[in-house]
Amino acid sequence: MFNVRRSPHNPILVPVQENPWETFAAFNWCPLVSKKSPKTIHCVYRAMSEPYLISEHHLRVSSIGYASSTNGTSFTNKAQLIKPELDWEKFGCEDPRITELNGKFYIFYTALSVFPFSAEGIKVACATTRDFKTIDQKHLVTPFNAKAMALFPSKIKGKMFALLTVNTDNAKRPAKIALARFDSEEDIWNSVYWNNWYKKLDEHVFSVRRSSSDHVEVGSVPVKTEDGWLVIYSHIQDYKSDHKIFGIEALLLDLEDPAKIIGRTRNPIMVPEETYEHYGQIPNVIFPSGALVRGKKLWIFYGAADTTSCIAEVDLRNLLNSMQPGIRNKLVTRYKKNPIITPSAKHPWEAKATFNPAAIDLDGKIHIIYRAMSEDNTSTMGYASTKDGFTIDERLFEPIYVPRKEFESKKVPNGNSGCEDPRIVRMDDTLYMCYTAYNGIEPPAVAMSTITVDNFLKKRWKWTKPVLITPRGIDDKDACIFPEKINNQYLIIHRIDRQMCVDYAVSLTEAGEEVNKGIRLMGPRYGMWDSAKIGLAGPPIKTKNGWILFYHGVGEDRYYRLGAVLLDLKNPLIIHGRTNEAILEPEKNYEKEGQIPNVVFPCGHILRENTIYHYYGGADSVIGVATTKLSDLLAMLA
């Protein structure tokens, strides 16, 4: 498991009006820390001018810029390093990758020789320098259509290796990431070598596309790690459609045999989310072009919306572990005797299903309030408790909460209705329970009822009359009251449409009138495991690092999975970290088979010392429990 965090300084490189060659865009940058100057980060990047109005084609011309930094946030010494000069690059130089080898710097870039642009005029070129001031040589590298070439930073068994992307602009052939190996530097720009290599292209290709409609392209220069060569690359879903999704993924190649893939990410580790990634020359684009190891972190250098240059970071060890099936680390451990609560044919009110449980820790017991469903699809709430977190010590024969108001009472015979999916929190001596109220006709709404702690513990089920705390007529679910007031106001988390939102209320008795904004907290990440919709799991847990909030996410495959975010202690609308992979997903039969297949759906999380207990519904039919070490989760999110 890992968490990718964007730099708060993004975007870091932006267009500069004082430099005519980069007035329009500065993006797709590649970093290097040289053995000659280990405290300096050298970067080359694609710079784009405004159109030259007197020129024949009125093109925005791309060239390669240079900048340096000592901290990774402020880059200076900017200069135009590589200009379109020769016939094979006269319409632009794009997207550089830089490697230090044999005592000099190799800069590979895309050279454009024809306009209008077409495959036969888009090829890989290489420039070399020793000081980032003077270009010593320039060579056209590939005699065929290719882009995004990156030289490995060290020889392997005496040979030089490089990755490149072939057929990037060929309408009849898909782009392919491939590996080339050279006996000498001269082979790199030897057309005879490349023509022979291209004849056997399929022998050199990595098969990394997830479907035939996807597009792939080399991102970073390979980074040498103790586990293997780490390669960050671009994976674009549905490339030729109007709904393409630009994602960043990673491969791990064998150290001694880089033709062998030993690990890869299962999903994108990044997709466009921020404003500077959504808006620019080409909207909704993130494109990886470099990577650096800085301490325990991997910095990913990428272009945003083909306009600016940005950085994101991820814990390197967590990323490497997540890529290798044999050592993939899991944050969540299931209880071996799951499910812990199942339907009871003896009790008609819970004969069909028992699922989606809330939980609260009081007087040394974890009290579980679960959704129960009868054969006529009426939902009520049952009660069970456990001392050790796993073994059910008590379970009541009658429901503790039933539909009482018209907004939750059945209107359609045998249709779904009732009180669904509770979440419960304690404030002072009162328990506040939010749940989904549904009468089978109107859209589901969020209702709330309270009970004193004393009455609850003595099993005197004197719940207050339920009130709707979200607007009627709006499909609203997955809600809880924040367990502490924020700025002397109640904070209500709920879900509208496909995303999680919040509202503030001065009084909960008048919340139905005050919940009228739906302030967005976070939404789906298109192309990732939570791409279709998200919603609250259980109430947040307070830690010294922030509020941990668990949420369920639904992907295009309709699987319900569990993720987590870390919210700011003082302002929970600020998200400090979000899991890039699901921490719990349907794997067991009781999660994959039931009323709704492929569902894990927690509504309650209990923290005891360093262990978080997750109480969840499996396939909308049964209840399971799983645990997470708080320290492990915080190490990833904080």
Image (tube, grey):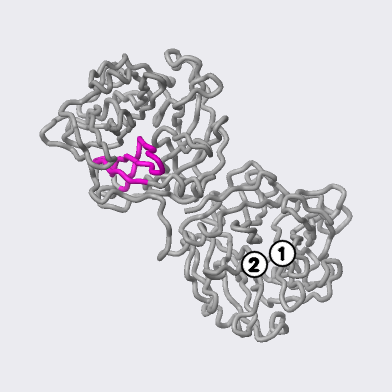
The first of marks 1 and 2 along the sequence is 1
Amino acid type of the residue that numbered disc 1 sits on in the rendered structure: Leu
Which quadrant holds the C terminus? top right
SS for callout 1: strand
Question: Answer yes or no: do the residues labelled 1 and 2 have beta carbons within 8 Å?
Answer: yes
In the rendered image, residue 573, in percent from the top left (x then y), is placed at 55, 32
Residue at mark 1: 32
* Residue 176 shown left or right of residue 499 in the figure: right
Highlighted range, magenta: 598-627
In the rendered image, residue 365, in percent from the top left (x then y), is placed at 28, 32
In the rendered image, residue 408, in percent from the top left (x then y), is placed at 29, 21
- Residue drawn at x 23%, y 21% as measured from the top left: 459
Real-space CA distance between mark 1 and mark 2, rounded to the nearest whole angstrom: 9 Å
Relative to 143, is 495 above or below? above
Q: Residues within 10 Å of mark 1 (few under 14, many from 20)?
A: many
Q: Main secondary structure of the magenta part?
A: strand
Q: Determine which of the numbered discs, if any, sits on residue 221 in the image.
A: 2
For residue 373, say whether it is visible: yes
- Farthest left residue? 346
Q: Determine which of the numbered discs, if any, sits on residue 201 in the image.
A: none
Front position in the image: 520 or 237: 520
Relative to 95, is 357 above or below? above
